[in-house]
């Protein structure tokens, strides 16, 4: 049995998705006449409440186009130290846009402190880069940013004259987690507030509406082979469109991919709750193993710290698991990600391989 828990990007298109791709009407999206791309852009923009959207080959390009559309050369964006659009995108905003990042460390729940955001906004003075943008990420490292926090941080940014971008690569995981907790500030342990029982799309929209632009990935938990969308105002998107072209992201019969993304929006959003449930099941099982400190998962990612004698054996673990058909990543801190191609039997198989390794 093969269980690939390295990432939710490893999914293969389902038969239904392949059928939707084969049936997709196509055109040339550089001429803006690919009907499947146009339909997808309208669908995601409507879903999240924006004037429009642009289909992008990757989340990296989507974030890059967003940052460069928000900022000019010599501007800066405030961003988390471990945020994807700072840490994991090759420094693209600085390399291609001469936009300087102002990274801030994350608090334990993944948020950036409001005080530090405020203090990082530079006065209008020739010594400083012009602070232009706040970029947040949700989910971040598998964690749901509390809705109260998202509101406060984005309101603060607006008051300081900054625009707001959300790297929502896993926005729908955030929406599912938020619908599950039914509470605006899970960290505070308060009672569920209101009636939001399970309306995942409404939650996605509620998060997205705090921002001027939102990037979502179809190729993560949603299970499409490639593609992201950048949502925003017409004006922002006209700048992003030019940048996408410069970045080489003007695709032609991209409707093949857009059809997969559209299928994913129709069929793979609500089911994300299953991934979250399997992540909880995995975390529960791992919690019983000596030498593992397991973070209770909030979405589809389980992080496990190896401590004590378990830590000394870390180097042997991944090869042992791989030999049993279980793929994961990390060394002292492991990451297990659930997705469309993982089922309950796969999770039990991964658990038994983990138990066997640490039993001897
Ligand atoms: C994967 C990811 C991206 C980038 O997406 P690619 O399609 O791999 O370029 C951006 N942000 C976050 C949070 C991600 O997880």
Image: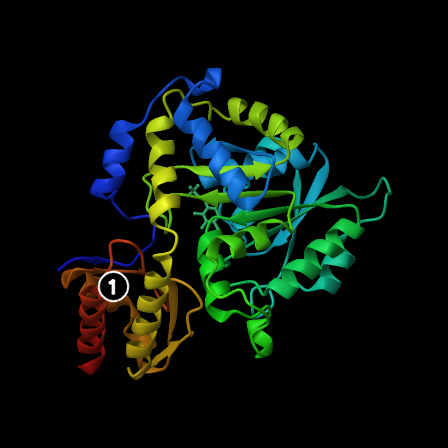
Q: Quadrant of the N terminus?
A: bottom left
Viewer-nearest residue: 178 or 311? 178
Report the coloring of the rendering. rainbow
Q: Mark yes or no: residue 143 visible.
A: no
Task: Quadrant for residue 25, please give it.
Answer: top left
Residue 91: horizontal and vertical position, in percent?
55, 41
User: Left of 311 or right of it: where is 174?
Assistant: right
At 37% from the left edge and 69% from the top edge, which residue is drawn?
Answer: 332
Label 1 residue near ligand 1, CB within 8 Å: no
* Classed neighbour count for the residue bearing mark 1: other residues with Cα under 10 Å, few (<14), some (14–19), many (≥20): some
At 53% from the left edge and 27% from the top edge, which residue is drawn?
Answer: 244
Viewer-nearest residue: 240 or 20? 20
Q: Quadrant of the C terminus?
A: bottom left
Q: Residue furthest left?
A: 1
Viewer-nearest residue: 284 or 275? 275
At 47% from the left edge and 41% from the top edge, which residue is drawn?
Answer: 59
Q: Which residue is mark 1?
A: 318
């Amino acid at each position: 049995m093969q269980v690939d828990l390295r990432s939710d990007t490893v999914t293969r298109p389902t038969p239904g998705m392949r059928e939707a791709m084969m049936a997709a009407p196509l055109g040339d999206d550089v001429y803006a006449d690919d009907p499947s791309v146009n339909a997808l852009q309208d669908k995601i923009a409507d879903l999240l409440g924006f004037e429009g959207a642009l289909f992008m080959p990757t989340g990296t390009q989507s974030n890059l186009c967003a940052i460069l559309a928000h900022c000019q050369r010599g501007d800066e964006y405030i961003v988390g130290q471990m945020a994807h659009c700072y840490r994991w995108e090759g420094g693209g905003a600085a390399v291609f846009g001469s936009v300087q990042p102002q990274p801030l460390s994350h608090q334990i729940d993944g948020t950036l402190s409001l005080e530090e955001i405020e203090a990082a906004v530079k006065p209008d003075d020739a010594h400083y880069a012009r602070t232009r943008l706040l970029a947040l990420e949700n989910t971040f490292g598998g964690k749901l940013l509390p809705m109260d926090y998202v509101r406060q941080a984005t309101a603060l940014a607006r008051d300081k004259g900054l625009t707001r971008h959300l790297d929502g690569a896993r926005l729908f995981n955030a929406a599912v987690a938020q619908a599950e907790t039914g509470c605006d500030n899970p960290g505070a342990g308060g009672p569920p507030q209101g009636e939001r029982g399970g309306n995942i799309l409404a939650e996605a929209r509620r998060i997205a509406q705090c921002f001027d632009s939102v990037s979502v990935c179809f190729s993560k938990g949603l299970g499409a082979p490639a593609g992201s969308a950048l949502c925003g105002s017409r004006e922002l998107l006209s700048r992003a469109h030019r940048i996408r072209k410069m970045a080489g992201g003007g695709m032609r019969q991209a409707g093949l991919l857009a059809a997969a993304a559209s299928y994913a929006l129709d069929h793979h959003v609500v089911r994300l709750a299953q991934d979250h449930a399997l992540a909880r099941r995995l975390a529960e099982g791992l919690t019983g193993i000596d030498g593992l400190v397991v973070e209770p998962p909030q979405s589809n990612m389980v992080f496990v710290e190896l401590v004590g004698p378990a830590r000394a054996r870390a180097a042997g673990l991944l090869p042992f698991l791989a030999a049993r058909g279980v793929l994961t990543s990390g060394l002292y801190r492991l990451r297990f990600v659930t997705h469309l191609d993982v089922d309950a039997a796969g999770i039990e198989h991964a658990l038994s391989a983990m138990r066997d390794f640490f039993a001897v």
